[in-house]
Image: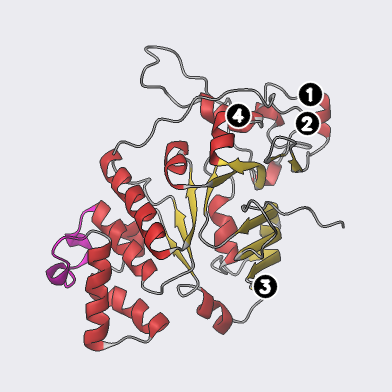
Amino acid sequence: MRPRPAISFRTGGRRMPFVSIRDLRVAFDGVRVLHGIDLDVGRGEAVGLVGESGCGKSVTWLAALGLLPGKARVTGSVRIEGRELIGARASEMEAVRGARIAMIFQDPSSSLNPVHRVGRQIAESLRLHRGLRGAQARAEAIRLLDMVGIPAAATRIDLYPHEFSGGQCQRVMIAMALAGQPDLLIADEPTTALDATIQAQILDLLSAIRRETGMAMVFISHDLGAVSAVCDRAAVMYAGRIVETNDVARLFAAPRHPYTRGLFDAIPELDSGRTRLVPIEGTVPDPRNLPQGCAFAPRCVRATAFCTAYAPDLKPQPEGGQVACFHPDPAAARARKPQAVPA
């Protein structure tokens, strides 16, 4: 099989990406849920993964980090600076997880251990990834809590997770992720369970940490407004495939794939009065019963008989970006800008 072109998230000259994913496929009990993901993430970049629930955004990175259950069959290649992770020994993966690549999840209440003080949980990461112990680890844990905006960190370090609000628990999770000084932070819908004001604070925090540390970030979200606030580039996923990718400005100004266009059309505008929303009819197909051809064809207003018979490949576009569609929107089409998360 001829190798497909990678989705490069770097402009200018060719440079080795920090993480390179090639033809990543995942199946559970014989049911395929990822159908060949190609993705590059360079050092210092912020990349957004966008799509409805069930499109494969989280599975992509859980597979890359070896965090899927044993029944999952993972094939393809995931390389970190040329070092292969798929099929790597447990000791090799432990040296990568937390230290090189860290991940935070959308529900901190289920990620933090309720019977251990938050300081102990952060200190565990510091011991594992940086060899810090005792007073040195405690001082660094306090510094990290202060860095992520926990007030009175020196006294609150000895509290339990239930003594923090939801937004503060998410900040604690970010502090734990930063404990290993990772080169790449995977933020898996970190603002979904928070109210709008706290969402904005977490997004500002992630952007500030990225500027201060120079780390790269993958921001997984269904919220286009959040992606526009923190990301340089974005890839849109549907039914286990990437269907469109471009830098944020171009993608938001002129989305080409009908699915991407549908995501924008479904966003309410604050100044639109009583205008009805334009939803994407239907739901993401069951992986056990994917339609033949393009998986989005049953929901697509531009689909033809050709679309139902053949699956499009992701192709570079003359104006930039890549699109997997036989009938993309015209390049000159304009999209409404998503409403920004309130500051």
Q: Residues within 10 Å of mark 3 (few under 14, many from 20)?
A: few
Residue 264 vertical position relative to residue 76 in the rendered view, above or below: above
Q: Is residue 238 magenta?
A: no
Q: Residues within 10 Å of mark 4 (few under 14, many from 20)?
A: some
Quadrant the C terminus occupies: top left
* Amino acid type, mark 4: Ala
Q: Given this view, does label 4 or label 2 mark the residue nearer the observer?
A: 4
Q: Is residue 163 magenta?
A: yes
Q: Are marks 1 and 2 in contact (CB under 8 Å)?
A: yes
Q: Residue furthest front?
A: 13
Q: Earlier in the sequence, mark 3 or mark 1?
A: 3
* Distance from the alpha carbon under mark 3 to that under mark 1: 41 Å
Q: Which mark is residue 326?
A: 2
**What SS does tag 3 mark?**
loop
Would you identify the image quadrant in which residue 90 lies?
bottom right
Residue under label 1, please give it.
Answer: 304
Residue under label 4, please give it.
Answer: 254
* Distance from the alpha carbon under mark 1 to that under mark 4: 22 Å
**What SS does tag 2 mark?**
loop
* Distance from the alpha carbon under mark 3 to that under mark 4: 34 Å
Q: Given this view, does label 3 or label 1 mark the residue nearer the observer?
A: 3
Q: Are marks 2 and 3 in contact (CB under 8 Å)?
A: no
Locate residue 31 relative to residue 281 in the image: left or right: right
- Magenta range is 150-165
Name the spot of residue 70 as percent of width and height, x first.
60, 70
Q: Which mark is residue 82?
A: 3
Name the spot of residue 91 as percent of width and height, x first.
55, 84
* Distance from the alpha carbon under mark 4 to that under mark 2: 17 Å
Q: Earlier in the sequence, mark 4 or mark 2?
A: 4
Locate residue 16 relative to residue 149 in the image: left or right: right
**What SS does tag 4 mark?**
loop
Name the spot of residue 30 as percent of width and height, x first.
71, 58
